[in-house]
Amino acid sequence: MTFRTHRAQRGITFLGLLFFGIILALLVIVGARVVPTVTEYMSITKAVKKAAQDGDTVPSVRAAFDRTASVDYIDSISGKDLEITKIDGKVIVRFAYDKEIPLFGPAYLLIKYRGASDSGYN
């Protein structure tokens, strides 16, 4: 009686490769739609910090933000959407907004962004 040893095959099947290819393609598509919103969020954070430094009254902070927003192509929020307070003589500017990203059909990805001019007051 002889026993044959079978070597374990390594690799991936065509269906496995196709499955991983589809998953990777979906991640790339979603990533391509999310990246612009993240860069806009970073621009908003930078503009809010600059506006908090430049202004000392509510109207001057809003105007400073609107000037920066028009240059940096910020469309999600405007100066009137900012929450501006003064704590210990320091201007603190907060913001929050939602971004809906259409995926396919009725499916959307909802991202809730929020931030402040001083990271301790988020």
Image: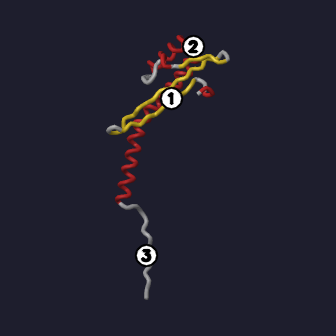
Q: Position of residue 59 (x, y in %)?
A: 53, 11
Quarter of the image where one finds residue 100: top left
Q: Where is mark 1, residue-wise?
A: 42
> Mark 2 falls on what kind of element?
loop
Placement of 57 over or under 121, stated as above or below: above
Label whose residue precedes the other's in the sequence (3 or 1):
3
Q: Is residue 90 above or below residue 99?
A: above
Q: Residue at x 40, y 38 (%)?
A: 32
> Closer to the camera, 106 or 44?
106
Q: Which residue is mark 2?
A: 55
Amino acid type indicated by mark 1: Met
Q: Residue at x 38, y 41 (%)?
A: 29
Where residue 79 appears, as percent x and y from the top left, is: 49, 17
Cα–Cα span, label 3 and label 1: 56 Å
Residue 60 percent location from the top left of the image: 54, 11
Quarter of the image with the N terminus is: bottom left
Q: Residue at x 59, y 17 (%)?
A: 85
Q: Earlier in the sequence, mark 2 or mark 1?
A: 1
Spatial separation of the CA atoms under disc 2 and disc 1: 20 Å
In the image, farthest residue toward the bottom: 1
Picture quarter with the C terminus = top right
Q: Which amino acid type corresponds to the residue marked 3 in the rendered image?
A: His
Query: Helix, strand or loop at disc 3?
Result: loop
Q: Within 10 Å of the Cα at label 1, are there few (<14), some (14-19), or many (20+) other Cα atoms?
A: few
Task: Tell me the colour scheme of the image.
Answer: secondary structure
Q: Are marks 2 and 3 in contact (CB under 8 Å)?
A: no
Task: Specify the farthest residue to the right.
Answer: 88
Q: CA distance from mark 2 to mark 3?
A: 76 Å
- The correct choice, above or below, for 41 with respect to 10 in the image is above
Look at mark 3 in the image and give the residue it sits on: 6
**Residue 85 located left or right of residue 104:** right
